Image (cartoon, rainbow, N blue to C red):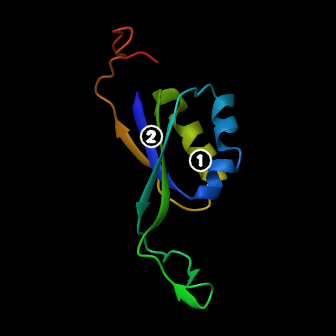
Amino acid sequence: MNLLGGSIARETLYSGLFEALKKIDVGGLTVIKKRGRGRRPPPEMHAGKGSMIFTPQFSDKYVVELFIDENKKDDAIKIIQEHASRGKIIITPNIHMIDISTGKIDSD
C-alpha cells in the first residue's frame, strides 16, 4: 500500500481525473485546499475598483491524497499525468494503515 499524493492545479480537479481513477477501482481520496507559492508567480488581480494591479504573495493549491495498492500504482500515476498540466506527484510507502471504525489493519 502506498500513499500517492501531490499538488495539482485547480483545473485538474474538473478534468475527469476522479472518474478515471474510479475506472481502475480507486474509491477513496482526499482533496485538500492550501495556499502556497511555487516557481510560477500567482496571477495578478485588480484592486482598488480596478485602478490598481495587485500580485498576491500566495495562490490556491490543491493536494490530492490517496492510498493505493502496489499493483495499481503505475496506472494511477499515468492517469494523474494525463489529466494534470502541472504539479507534483509524491509516492510514499505506507508501513501500516488501521481503519478506525473496523479495526482492520492494512486493508482497503
Look at the numbered disc 1 and give the secondary structure of its residue. helix
Q: Are marks 2 and 1 in contact (CB under 8 Å)?
A: yes
Residue at 46% x, 18% y: name it. 108
Disc 1 crowd, CA 10 A, few/some/many (<14, 14-19, 20+):
many
> Is 12 or 53 nearer to us in this picture?
53
Look at label 2 and name its amino acid.
Leu
Residue denoted by label 2: 4
> Percent position (x, y) of residue 4?
45, 40
75 w.r.t. 99: above or below: below
Residue at 41% x, 69% y: name it. 37
As drawn, the residue found furthest toward the left would be: 95
As drawn, the residue found furthest toward the bottom would be: 51
As drawn, the residue found furthest toward the front would be: 49
> Is 51 or 24 nearer to us in this picture?
51
Look at the numbered disc 2 and give the secondary structure of its residue. strand
Disc 2 crowd, CA 10 A, few/some/many (<14, 14-19, 20+):
many
> Percent position (x, y) of residue 42?
51, 74
> Percent position (x, y) of residue 6?
46, 50
Look at label 1 and name its amino acid.
Ile
78 w.r.t. 38: above or below: above
15 w.r.t. 28: above or below: below
| Residue 99, disc | none
The answer to whether residue 35 is left or right of residue 12 is: left
Residue denoted by label 1: 80
